[in-house]
Image (cartoon, rainbow, N blue to C red):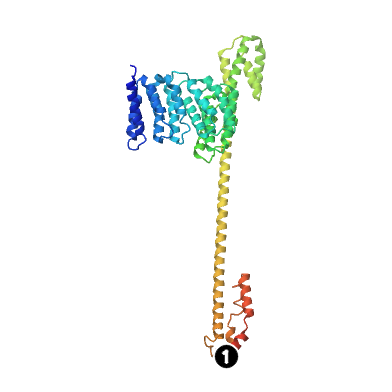
Amino acid sequence: MAITKQTSGELKSRVNNCIDKLSDRDTLSMAANELEAIARTLPNDAFAPFLNCLSATDSSEKSPVRRHCVRLIGVLSAAHGDALSPHVSRMISAVLRRLRDPDSAVQSACVDAVASIAAHVNSPPFAVMLKPLVDTLFHEQDLKPQIGAALCLSAAVEAAPEPDLPELRKLLPRVLKLVKSDCCKAKPALLSVVGSVVGSDCVKSKNLLSSIVSTAVDFLSSEDWAARKEAAEVLEKVAVACRSLAAEFKASCVAALESRRFDKVKLVREKMNRALEIWKDLPEQSEDVASPNVESDSSSACESPENVPQARKMHQTRSGSCSWSSSSSSSRKSIAGNEDNRPCIPSSSKLNLKKNIRSRVVPFDITKSNLENLKEFEDMSLIRRQLQQIENQQSNLLDLLQRFMGSSQKGMSSLEQRVDGLEKVLDVMSHDFAISTRRISAPTAEPLGNTCCMIPGADFLSPKFWRKAEPQTVLASTFRNYQPSQCKDATHAPRNS
């Protein structure tokens, strides 16, 4: 049933009233529940007015209003699915307008809304939603819109049940070029786009995979920990999604991840170790290449029966040979040999061929395990050396602290002795000065001339008490200017009135 103008007006009024209530904390929960109920029960003809109400909100509204309006687009997509296919462009444009929002919660709501659209609205081609996201990603120069567009694109690729693989394959070199450019500010978000595209299993070219691996390995040593984390995740997805093509890059990737496995950030360290385990589980390139070569040689031997005698000779020399190349070539040619010179290969020779090949592969596996054990031993020895170095540094610091404490105690005791000696000198000088000025009477037991010479002797003025040059110089000048005769004359001189 077509919606009438009156019904459309009532719907707009009801939706706008609920949106106004979102700005109030007391009515926020009630208004949000009512708007979700409206979105789930909308008829098809009411999609356009409902989306108009959601798009009418601007940046002047409060953050809960902006966040819930974007969230309602995802709720609408999950509730109605392909019925919203005519309105996908309007919904994507409404989401992209919120990528500049300063609130990170609004940006997270945009990512969730795009993922909901990609997961539930499958009727239009994926390129209809991919094009505006890619245009925003490559034309925006600010950091927030770049991050938001990259995260939305990554979420759309991961959520879409059937993404457009040829379009994604064309998009991937452009994204890699943008990641390496200096104008790009959202490198971790773009690396997440690369990982999502690789995870969609659209990479079938070895050259493209080489470019992806080299870019990810370069970003493993980035100063931004988020970029290092996303680069490790890209390598992990390469090892999972492109297992057959990734064997060629196993050595370089394992070496790069081994050198960065002890990252200082815990999240990055966990991601590095997980990617390293997956890469170590990949088969070697030689193991993958051996079987197709054997099959091709066996088919050629079956077609040409005149090579049977030569094959028997090669089969005899194979047992005494020690090199892998001669033994492998002889095993390939010996499958054509039998006693009746028949052109076809019996089943027993095929079994012998498989056994011979396996017998040649076993030592390689043993060597590989020995190398891995050797690497683990080297890592443990390196850790042990580092711990020993830390212990030595701690012991040196403790020794230095003990020496400092001992010298401090000696300095404090020496300072106490100096202060004590200075107090004694000042006491004697003040006593002599008081006698000379007749403030106190001189003792009768001693001559008056000796009262001014009660300053301690040379044993008190020894370097034991006066180690610093400055106090010693001051006291020496004081004693030099102090004349006992003057004190004696001053005691007999009459006091001035």
Q: Note whether residue 367 is visible.
A: no
**Relative image position of residue 215 (x, y in whole percent):** 58, 30
Q: Report x, y in % for residue 448.
A: 58, 89
The amino acid pointed to by label 1 is Pro
Q: Quadrant of residue 367?
A: top right
Mark 1: secondary structure: loop
> Looking at the rendering, in which quadrant would you find the C terminus?
bottom right
Q: Is residue 442 above or below residue 193?
A: below
Q: Residue at x 41, y 32 (%)?
A: 66
User: Horizontal and vertical percent for residue 197?
Assistant: 52, 25
User: How far across and how far down the image is residue 239, in percent?
Assistant: 53, 27
Along the viewing direction, whichever of 361 and 490 lies nearer the viewer: 490
Q: Which residue is located at x 55 percent, y 13 percent?
A: 347
If the image is split into quadrants, where does the N terminus sit?
A: top left
Please give the name of the residue rendered at 62% of the width and 74% of the height, measured from the top-left corner. 474
What residue does disc 1 label? 494
Q: Is residue 343 above or below residue 34?
A: above
At x 64%, y 9%, the residue is 305
Q: Nearer the viewer, residue 35 or 441?
A: 35
